[in-house]
Amino acid sequence: MNDLCRYLGIDYPIIQGGMGNISNAPLTAAISNAGGLGTIGVGTMELEEVEALIKATQNKTGKPFAVNIPINVSPYTKDIIHLLVKYEVEVVSLSAGNPAPYIEFLHDHHIKVMTVVGTVRQAVKAYKSGVDIIVAEGYEAAGINATQESTTMTLLPQIVDQVDVPVVAAGGIGDGRGLAAVLALGASGVQMGTRFIATKEAPFHNHYKQALLEANDHQTTIVGREVGRVRRIMNTPYAEKLKQLEQSGADVDNFSELTSEHYHKIGALEGKLEEGFINAGQISGIVKDIPTVQQLLNSMLEELRGSIITLEQYQLPIK
């Protein structure tokens, strides 16, 4: 854990997941200022919007933050990488594609490279290509997920056994108990998205936050299996429309359009849950309050401390 923190220049082994086109400077900076690693997710943003977002974040924090680039989604991957060099961003998170072609250039410019993976095979390839940190994301996570749908608890230890770089767990983690669990499985830290939505600094519509507060253990749903576009979202009226469309035999292009970042923004930023969707992970059911980011991180460390169990506490002697 301390190695990850020292390497990234952060206090807590807690990283913000990329939030695509709803990323914003206030939340990213708040997470970095609180001691974690905030992240800008560029999604399909225009280059000028990405540049403005980097500058706005740097105006709000002098601490490290990451930029997440979905390689095969953003039409501006190479241009955004040059922006990272221009603005001396310290960490990049690469997802949704092969990171190998970009790693040497990024390292030459002293940028640390994280890669999000959903399978052991992807993790091994990323490790061999020279990435610095691997994020093992299970299908409990919000948003776009691997079609193999491996869970975090099963995926994480298999990846830890195969690579010799820090591994960060993502998907299904929203408190200190989850942090303790993945540390026990060999992770060096956690990446969270859903839990950060329900914080005071997160500038999302109240309908989004309220949906998380009211969520139970089966409030999220998977759409896109039939068209190979697996995505976990909150089970809202719009989600029901998507499922009906999928069951009726929607074509890939039509379904991809209706699950694009445009409709995500309608749900997340405008709060129109009949006209757009909201990403949400399976951890939604444990969200019961809206703290500040600092309060959340502090509570996670307190919960972590209370979750550490020794053999003596269980009266399990080693023979």
Image (cartoon, rainbow, N blue to C red):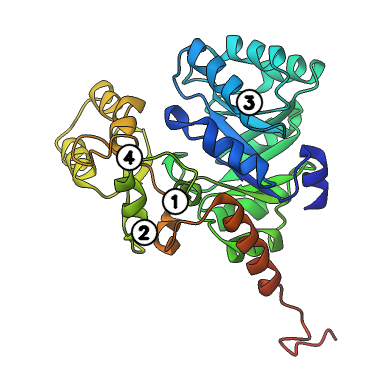
> Foreground mark, 3 or 2?
3
* Amino acid bearing label 4: Arg
> Foreground mark, 3 or 1?
3
Mark 3 secondary-structure assignment: helix
Mark 4 secondary-structure assignment: helix
**Residue 309 seen in the current view:** yes
Residue identified by numbered label 2: 213
> Foreground mark, 2 or 4?
2
Quadrant for the C terminus, please: bottom right
CA separation, marks 2 and 4? 27 Å
Residue identified by numbered label 1: 198
* Amino acid bearing label 3: Asn
Mark 2 secondary-structure assignment: helix
CA separation, marks 3 and 2? 31 Å
Instruction: Depth check: give the residue in front, 56 or 114.
Output: 56
Residue identified by numbered label 3: 59
Instruction: Depth check: give the residue in front, 27 or 171.
Output: 27
**Residue at the image position 53 percent from the left and 52 percent from the top:** 292
Residue identified by numbered label 4: 225
Instruction: Depth check: give the residue in front, 220 or 151.
Output: 220
Instruction: Depth check: give the residue in front, 176 or 56.
Output: 56
Instruction: Residue lying at the far bottom in this picture: please name it.
Output: 315
Mark 1 secondary-structure assignment: loop
